[in-house]
Image (cartoon, rainbow, N blue to C red):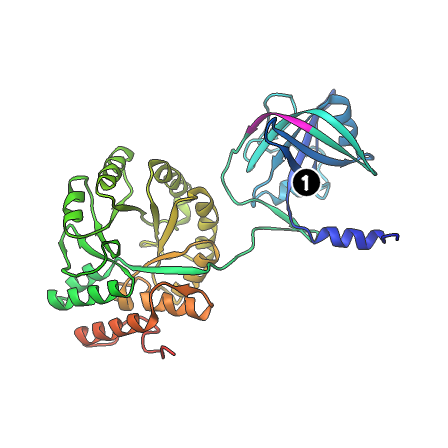
Amino acid sequence: MTIDPDTFRSVLAQWPSGVSVVTTVAGDGWHGMTASSFSSVSMDPPLILVCLNRRITTHALIEASGVFAVSVLAKDQTMVGRRFAGQEGVADRFAGGAWETRVTGAPVLTDAVGWLDCRVVHAYAGGDHTIFVGAVLGASTERVVAPLLFHSRAWGQLADVLPDLVSVADTGLLSALRTHAVPATAAGALATALRAAGVRVRVRDPYGCLVSTGDRRTATALVATADEVADAALSGAGVIELPAGDPVVTKHILDEAGRYDMTAACWLPDAFAPARAADVLDAVDMLAALGCAEIGLDEGAEAASPRQVRELLQDATVRARPVSLRVRLRDRHGLGLVNALTAMKSGVRHFDTTLGGIDGVLACEDVQFLADRLGVACDSPRAALVAAAADLERHLGGALPGRTYRVSTS
């Protein structure tokens, strides 16, 4: 049976792959091409392969030089891929790029997701292609970001997949109830109700605490120093929250939390402000390296757009792994739930909220409502959140900012 060439190409185009630039060095300089036919072969010894058409120039040059490098492109390097695929019509494909040599003399892209520098150890005929197997002599993951993808003859990025489960925590009720002068007994009862529903509630901060009962894993304490950790543990909190700051101080607090078997969540303020993106990502790296169990990204004073949320989280979720990310979003200009959806589709599962949205932060019952409508499970039952919101409304004597607490629980 003979396969029609167009059908064959069409079927192969359905296989999504990463995008790499394969480079080599010859007497007259550097040469390279975009390729997706790249794969690992062996871990010990480290071997990879690239498959190149025998009719192209790069094939002949690698055959002659015996060396090649592979640079794996990032999501923001589509133009590099197009340039080395011959789609940009430039005279010098390497001009303006961060290209350098390492071991073999073949150039590597130093701001790619990663690169591998290789010496050819085998060359196998494969129809109209040659399979070059390279021994890896040098390698690096220069930039931890999402990769560039190629599918059906189009450039793309990782698909947005909704999580199977989300959780909501309440980090604003304590201070908001204090501001509204809600009696301590009523405030404690609200916190207890939320904790019974599986919501993690901030029950202690430097200005006071809520007297409530429940599993210690559902009680958090905001601390600023290591000395406050012991008091938080004695008050029944199983989680500490702290603002990210000096690495030495942060490490001291984390170590103290470890002594009491407490989970630590470190928060970064104004995380989605475009001017802070580089600093925030560096801080994510630092906190993950220090051993922080959770890293929180707070929208802060500057309203974030869905695009800003997505652009930061695409990189932050990759760089934080395996550490969990949390987000605290405001409900401004009607974009709060849109940003929450964007966060879910960017890999975030944990949302810090406030019951009823009474401090401007997204309401826990609204995030749960969104998850329910998306078919995403939430570890806190909606009926319990709505009942707590109704109680809060009675205490405050007026409607809450939250959008969905009056919507049927059915």
Magenta run includes residue 138? yes
What's the residue at 33%, 38% (across, down)? 291
**For the residue labelled by badge 1, is the local secondary structure a helix, a strand or a loop?**
helix
In this rendering, would 82 be left or right of 138?
right
Q: Is residue 152 above or below residue 57?
A: below
Q: Is residue 89 above or below residue 63?
A: below
In the rendered view of the protein, which quadrant contains the C terminus?
bottom left
Magenta residues?
134-139
Judge whether residue 92 can be spotted in this image: yes
Pick the front one: 336 or 16? 16
Q: Is residue 300 above or below residue 139?
A: below
Q: Which residue is mark 1?
A: 83
Q: Whole-percent x and y of residue 50?
A: 70, 35
- Number of marks drawn: 1
Pick the front one: 31 or 90? 31
In this rendering, would 307 be left or right of 18?
left
In this view, the residue farthest toward the right is 1
Q: Residues within 10 Å of mark 1 (few under 14, many from 20)?
A: many
Judge whether residue 339 can be spotted in this image: no
Q: Whole-percent x and y of residue 311?
A: 47, 50
Residue 340 picture quarter = bottom left
Q: Whole-percent x and y of residue 326?
A: 36, 52
What's the residue at 58%, 50% (across, down)? 157
Q: Whole-percent x and y of residue 189?
A: 17, 67
Magenta run includes residue 51? no
In this rendering, would 160 be left or right of 38?
left
